[in-house]
Image (spheres, rainbow, N blue to C red):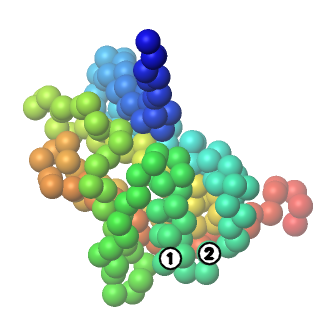
Amino acid sequence: MSRQSTRLDTKKVNSELLTLTYGALVSQMLRDFENVDDVNKQLDRIGFNMGMRLIEDFLSRTGSGRCLDMRETADKIQLAFRMYLNVQPTISNWAASADEFSLIFDTNPLTEFVELPADYQQLRYSSILCGCIRGALEMVQLEVQCWFSQDQLKGDATTEIRVKFVRRLEDAVPAGED
């Protein structure tokens, strides 16, 4: 008799674990906070803090240097999604001024087992992703705005995140060191 080995795809298992854990976090936050707007703010804040820490890991793994324009920045964001969430968004819908673009996701890994109830339509379930992008870019002196313009959880065909360059941040001199 031979034994059939059951090999698990660790990337798939990790992705499903992340999806379920994130869903439990959002569910608990909805119970803890009475207001969906407060949950949205908290998810964005958590993502921002994650992005501030993930950028160091990303830079050390990839050896990336400073991006010279938003097109390079978009490519690095796309690479980060592939590295950390095993999805590759499409970069499109560039503004004429090349300071704004979209990340289009065929599937959002955070929403794999999720359905939003009708009374939670104002919930920005995946806003942790926008916060993460903003936090990471702020650590490399780029201030951006980031928001969902389409969301599959709300009935759209795809999920689309818009990223808009606001300004390059100057290195701050610590207080008392002028």
Which residue is rendered at x = 58% and y = 55% of the image? 136
Asked if the residue under mark 2 is in contact with the one under mark 1, i.e. CB atoms within 8 Å, the reply is: yes
In three-dimensional space, the C-alpha distance between marks 1 and 2, rounded to whole angstroms, equals 7 Å
Q: Position of residue 125 (x, y in %)?
A: 30, 38
**Label 1's element?**
helix
**Label 2's element?**
loop
Q: In this view, does 131 lie above or below 11?
A: below
| Visible residue check, residue 168 | yes
* Quarter of the view holding residue 102: bottom left
Q: Position of residue 124 (x, y in %)?
A: 29, 42
Provide the residue designation for mark 1: 70
Q: What residue type is labelled 2?
A: Cys
Horizontally, residue 115 falls left or right of residue 148, namely left
Label 1 neighbour load within 10 Å: few <14, some 14-19, many 20+: some
**Which label is found at residue 67?**
2
**Which label is found at residue 80?**
none
Which residue is rendered at x = 33% and y = 81% of the image? 95
Which residue is rendered at x = 27% and y = 55% of the image? 106
* Quarter of the view holding residue 90: bottom left
Which residue is rendered at x = 62% and y = 75% of the image? 67
Q: Which of 76 and 14 is in front in this view?
A: 14
* Quarter of the view holding residue 128: top left
Residue at the outermost bottom position: 96
Q: Which amino acid does label 1 sit on?
A: Met
Label 2 neighbour load within 10 Å: few <14, some 14-19, many 20+: some
Horizontally, residue 13 falls left or right of residue 65, namely left
